[in-house]
Amino acid sequence: MSGIPFIVSAPSGAGKTTLCKMAVDFFPDLRHSISYTTRKPRPGEVDGVDYKFIDDAVFDKMVESGEFLEYAGVYGKRYGTSGKDLEALLDQGLSVILEIDVQGADKVRPVLKNGVDIFILPPSIEACADRLRSRGKDTPVEIEKRLKIAEDEIKKAPEYDYIIVNDDLEEAFEKFKSIITAEKAKTERMLGAVERLFGASVKS
Ligand code: ADP
Ligand code: 5GP
């Protein structure tokens, strides 16, 4: 049984990395898809854990060799998801969070037919600004660049299966957990369990 790809997008500072890390810690069968990026690590970020940090030449080679399921230019840097890495996790029956931007979500939606996409909405764009400033890991110029396109990103929220407002973090996490739990229990994903009981094929 293949795991479920959960596609999570949000404007910068909405709290998506925080929520995704909480979810990966909570669900034993959930993993984080580690993207490749040409951006430099922030203080505290670890290569191979937060991202695979690569330079433009390596990124170009990976594009040429068709390694990416999707890739996009975001806030002036490039980010991509390896199709091979993702498949390896899904094939083990693990569900995977793809924390990708709205362009990436547009690209993977037609490919990952069993994907579930979730948009994390901030209570306001000002809240994103405050959170990015208090996170203290981006320059004011970088923060400005990110906030500038927040509205355009938010306009894409209606295209997602679910929208979670991340105002109170614990409340938002409860919703995130509920979505993951409910999606795992969907009938189409549980037919294998029914078949195992009766040893026969069950038609949907
Ligand atoms: P993103 O990945 O969407 O850019 P992060 O998860 O890095 O955002 O969160 C940005 C900052 O906001 C972090 O310092 C995080 O601890 C904080 N944060 C996340 N969710 C909330 C929340 N609900 N209320 C207040 N601060 C939050
Ligand atoms: P950050 O630099 O804050 O870690 O991420 C910047 C943006 O790039 C976020 O919207 C994040 O979701 C997105 N991103 C991270 N990895 C990928 C990826 O593999 N593909 C795409 N399309 N976007 C990504």
Image (cartoon, rainbow, N blue to C red):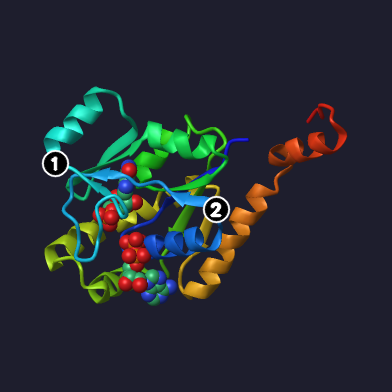
Q: Is residue 195 left or right of residue 17?
A: right
Could you tell me which residue is drawn at 12 percent across and 63 percent down? 141
Tag 2: Cα neighbours inside 10 Å, few (<14), some, or many (≥20)? some
> Which residue sits at x=81%, y=26%?
201
**Badge 1: how crowded within 10 Å, few (<14), some, or many (20+)?**
few
Percent from the top left, x then y, of residue 171? Answer: 55, 72
Residue shown at 40% from the left, 60% from the top: 16
Quarter holding ligand 1? bottom left
Position of residue 160 measured from the top left corner of the image (x, y, whole percent):
50, 47
Could you say which disc has been placed on residue 172 in the image? Answer: none
Q: Is residue 141 above or below residue 180?
A: below
Q: Which residue is mark 1?
A: 55
Q: Position of residue 39 (x, y in %)?
A: 18, 50
Residue at the farthest top position: 65
Q: Position of residue 76 (x, y in %)?
A: 17, 47
Tell me the quadrant of the picture where the C terminus can be found: top right
| Residue wearing tag 2 | 162
Left or right side of 171 for 150: left
Residue 152 visible to the viewer: no
Q: Nearer the viewer, residue 102 or 175?
A: 175
